[in-house]
Image (cartoon, grey):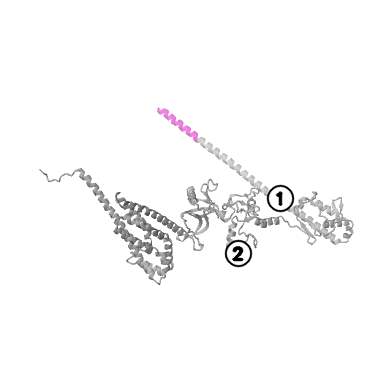
Amino acid sequence: MSSGLPPPVSDDDDDAKQPDEREQKRQRNRKRAVDELIATEQTYVDNLRLLKEMYFEPLQNNKKLKLKDKLQSILGEIETIINLNANLLSTLISNEKVGESMLQFVPFLKMYQNYINSHEATSATLTDLIKNNSDFSAFLQQQQNGARSKGQSLQSFLILPIQRIPRYELCLKEIIKLTPAEHPDLPALQQCFEQICQVNKSINDRIHEFHDREKVKSIESRFGMTQNVSLVAPARKYIREGYMKKVSRKKDIKYMFILFSDLLIYCSESGHGAATKLKLHQRLPFDLYFEIKKVDNNRKYGNKCLEIDSTPKSFLCICEDQSVRDDWHDAVKQCLDRMRNNRKLKDSKKKDGRILDVAPVWIPDDFSERCMIPSCMKKFTFTRRRHHCRYCGRLICSACSKNTLPHFNSKLKQHRHAHNKSNGNGSGSSGGSGGGATQYQDIVRVGTLCYDKYKLHFPDYDLKVNRKRNHQSMSMTSSTPKGAEYELNWDDESEFDNDSDSDETSSTAHKHQNNASLSVSVSAAAAASSPIRQSARVTAYKPNFSANNSNAKSKPEIVDTTTDEALPSPADVPQMSHHGNSSLSLESMAGTRYQAMLDTIQAKLNKERKSNLELQGQIEDLRAENQRLRKSKVDLMNWSNVEIAKHKKEIQSLKQQIQKQGGQNTEGQ
């Protein structure tokens, strides 16, 4: 008897129906994905045609705007892309094999690459037209407010081709996922997907570069209009920015540091809020000699310092803390390593012809109280001011900085000056003479050590300037009898061995002047025949006087045995005795000469006294420093004794507590 129930279904029938249902569902989803690809392609082509109808054709026919020359740069590739995608759309509708249709389309994607490459220039041209052409701006606003555009601007239409390639990749990925392995269109789909992925990667790289340039442009716009700062360059990317203090000569100054992939700049800020503007202070381009180092255990700043060595300038930076310092160091190192791997670090020293690899780091004024030249070490005072050697950055005194040399980058400065002068923009220089001589644009102070080390690089400058200056400094003025018959002899060599003082020589001369005939003879002989004998110490500071009459005949000399001085011949004595005025003038000349010698010796003594006073001052400073160290030692010993006693008390109290706890445990047991 039947109960009216349907016959039972076996489990084998259920297993047979489940794969069929999954396959049908997979086919439905695949068809839906293909329909979505076709639908989005239809919308994309319609928007491109709308762009042509609403913007391209009206602008081409509008004679008032006069934009025919610039339309090609703005909408040049749009017509080609419209024709290409229209053909792809018709092929997708008529052919069920999506892979074959798309594979025919992939080789023409180079047109998209050209469009993307020129998109940045197109955006710049469009921005300038909107800013400078009021009629064009009004036309764009009118079209955007129209019913057909649905509020979309010209810029939103122009970016559609850039956004379309990634959409192809997503659609093909979904279709391949839903395509069975035995489907005949699967190999073509996979091949098409790989090629579109490569194109999409290239386009993404271009987009990232575009955004990087836009970021660099935004930073460039933060500078004042009067500075004409240009930061945009090929392959330049923005990395990071932040505040650091630059250790300067007199104080630490806070700057905004901005790091790019090939450049580091620092600038100051002016204004407040949205009106804040940057003022550029220095560019530090990356080259083969650029270097950044961590400075650990600095006695003033601790572990927060960075040393930046570059061609234009080198200095120390102070960060907020050690972690910020490490971040900056790692970021700059990564940029340098990336450029080094790509072989983009240039040898600027070979190009510029400079002497030093990088600029020296200047020592701050408060770093040392004495001259840093080892042979000097004099203390800086109100009159002995601080100076910096431009070749090593040390603190030196005025005596050690008398030598000068051209700037270590003078060849580059000279080349720029010659280029400006050839263009009519330059004038004379301050470092050299006219004519065909070498002209240096920047003359700087250098210490004695650097002068001896680098003077061979500028032989012409050293010969003309420093040697002349040294010769003038060695020359000393003296009371010289004015007359055509006398000349100065600056030879420091002496052939005499008389070590008598000038006072004895003067008294000896005065003794001979008591005898009239003998004094006349001695004075005439001293003026015409031979100079009065002086000690070697005196001749080292004062010149000798000799007669200019080289044609005078030599006569036999008579030697006075009491003074070892040459006397005139007897024939000359009567002749000279008749000229009393000549004798008086010679006597006054001899007295003036002796007085000049005495003045020179007195000046030398004063110099020695001054040097002794300076040495005494240094000794007093060393004594004061010794006293301070002794006091610090006593204070340290007192502090250590107090700490030792304190710790002893703590140890004693801990021992007592341990004993109490041990006694309590014993009682409890």
Tag 2: amino acid: Ser
Mark 1 lies on residue: 609
Which residue, as the protein is rendered here, is positioned at the far bottom?
Answer: 64
Where 94 falls versus 305 (above or below)? Answer: below
For label 1, the crowd category at 10 Å Cα-Cα, with few meaning under 14, some 14 to 19 and many 20 or more, is few
Q: Is residue 381 visible?
A: no
- Sequence-first disc among 2 and 1: 2
Residue 114, image x and y in percent?
Answer: 41, 60
Quarter occupied by residue 407? bottom right
Residues at marks 2 and 1, CA–CA distance in whole angstroms: 49 Å
**Residue at the image point whose x is 55% and y is 39% from the top:** 640
Indicate which label's residue lies in the foreground, 2 or 1.
2
Mark 2 lies on residue: 427
Relative to 162, 226 lies left or right: right
SS category of the residue bearing label 2: loop
Residue 333, image x and y in percent?
Answer: 49, 50
Relative to 450, 42 lies left or right: left
Relative to 262, 613 lies left or right: right
User: Is 651 a magenta residue?
Assistant: yes
Q: How many marks?
A: 2
SS category of the residue bearing label 1: helix
Q: Is residue 322 visible?
A: yes
Tag 1: amino acid: Arg
User: Is 180 a magenta residue?
Assistant: no
Residue sitting nearer the eye, 369 or 457: 457
Which span of residues is magenta-colored? Answer: 650-669
Q: Which mark is residue 403?
A: none
